[in-house]
Amino acid sequence: MSTENDALSQARAAYEDHVRTCRQCHYDQSPCAVSKHLLRTYNNVRRTQRQRAAG
């Protein structure tokens, strides 16, 4: 279970770090392709974790 939590926290940290440091995401307030990919990865990990908990 902690491995799943680690994956979720790593995905979230990667997304938040990118948004904070990326010029386009942070200053222009417009998500770049990398940001969209990292958010999609985070959402997929979160969705998988919820499905395992429910089923």
Image (tube, rainbow, N blue to C red):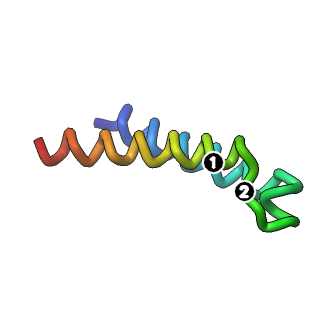
Position of residue 22 measured from the top left corner of the image (x, y, whole percent) = 83, 51
**Which element type, helix, strand or loop, lies under badge 2?**
loop
Specify the quadrant of the image occupied by residue 19: bottom right
Spot occupied by residue 53 in the image (x, y as percentages of width and height)? 18, 45
- Circle 1 residue: 36
* 9 to the left or right of 55: right
Q: Is residue 27 left or right of residue 1?
A: right
Residue under numbered circle 2 = 31
If the image is split into quadrants, where does the N terminus sit? top left
First-in-chain label (2 vs 1): 2
Figure quadrant of the C terminus? top left
Mark 2 and mark 1: span between their CA atoms? 7 Å
User: Alpha-carbon neighbours of circle 2 within 10 Å: few (<14), some, or many (≥20)?
Assistant: some
How packed is label 1: few (under 14 Cα within 10 Å), some, or many (20 or more)?
A: few
Identified at 66% across, 54% down, the residue is: 16
**Residue at x 45%, y 36% (from the top left corner):** 7
Mark 1: amino acid: Lys
SS of the residue under disc 1: helix
Q: Amino acid at mark 2?
A: Pro
Q: Which mark is residue 7?
A: none
Q: Residue at the location (72% across, 56% down)?
A: 31
Task: Identify the image quadrant of residue 38.
Answer: top right
Verify CB contact (< 8 Å) between mark 2 and mark 1: yes
Q: Report whether 50 appears left or right of 17.
A: left
Give the x, y percent position of residue 39: 56, 49
